[in-house]
Amino acid sequence: MSITDVRKSRGRPITTGIGTPITLRLQPGQLAALDHWIEQQPYPKPTRPEAVRQILNGTLGELN
């Protein structure tokens, strides 16, 4: 078998996460507030998406 005999599938090779992805646009002041909140968190600092999840859980209660 040669290399050209093996066909790869197109697209992402694996699922990258669980849940429904959303796109969120923040105004500069909102982004600055989010980044400030992240800076106040202990190490390891959450990523922006994780920070949004933590803030939502803190505001709405644990939803999982």
Image (spheres, rainbow, N blue to C red):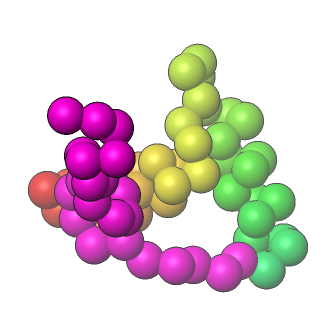
The answer to whether any part of residue 59 appears in the image is: no
Q: Position of residue 37 (x, y in %)?
A: 67, 47
Q: Is residue 18 left or right of residue 57?
A: left
Quadrant placement of the C terminus: bottom left
* Residue lying furthest top: 43
Residue 32, quarter of picture = bottom right
Identify the residue shown where x is 25% and y is 47%.
Answer: 5
The quadrant the N terminus occupies is top left
Please give the range of residues in magenta. Answer: 1-26
Q: Position of residue 58 (x, y in %)?
A: 37, 55
Q: How far across and how far down the image is residue 6, in percent?
A: 24, 46
Using the image, determine if residue 43 lies above or below residue 23: above
The residue depicted at 58 percent of the width and 18 percent of the height is 43
The residue located at (29%, 36%) in the rendering is 2
- Is residue 49 something that shows in the picture? yes
Task: Decide: is 4 above or below 29.
Answer: above
Magenta span includes 15: yes
